Amino acid sequence: MRRGAWQTETPTNGGDPWGGLVETPAATSYAQTYKRLVGAVMKDRCYADSVANYSCSLFRHNEYVAEVLWNSITGLQVLYRDLAGDEEAITNASVAVGNQQILIENEQLP
């Protein structure tokens, strides 16, 4: 993929065409997805229910467990992260989930 697709074409450093580019939301989403998946193991298939709630469980060493969800929540996790990398605490076992993927975790990813 061309470099410009992941970064803005407008330099922010006064003229250097590659030295001061700003990361695009697509690049941030890619980086977050990469961080979530690389090194994780899916021990089972992803699931979908009758009302289009989907979930995929991810496992890592030291009992780390996370779920990638869209349109669903399990209530077992304590925080979630969006594709921009922003982290939010889960309160009252409830998270508003839309068409953007979020990662729900039982602990912070190191």
Image (cartoon, rainbow, N blue to C red):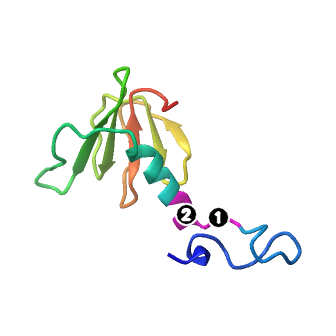
Disc 1 residue type (three-letter):
Glu
Task: Specify the quadrant of the image occupied by residue 56.
Answer: top left
Of all residues shown, which one is farthest toward the top?
62
Q: CA separation, marks 2 and 1? A: 6 Å
Q: Which residue is tagged 1?
A: 23
Residue span colored magenta:
22-29
Q: Main secondary structure of the magenta part?
A: helix
Left or right of residue 97: residue 13:
right
What residue lies at 30% left-to-right and 31% top-to-bottom? 75
Relative image position of residue 71 (x, y in whole percent): 29, 53
Q: Residues within 10 Å of mark 2 (few under 14, many from 20)?
A: some
x, y percentage for residue 54? Answer: 22, 51
Q: Which residue is mark 2?
A: 27
Instruction: Please tell me whether residue 24 belongs to the stretch shown in magenta.
Output: yes
Which x, y percent locates residue 106?
Answer: 39, 27
Q: Residue at x 64, y 64 (%)?
A: 23
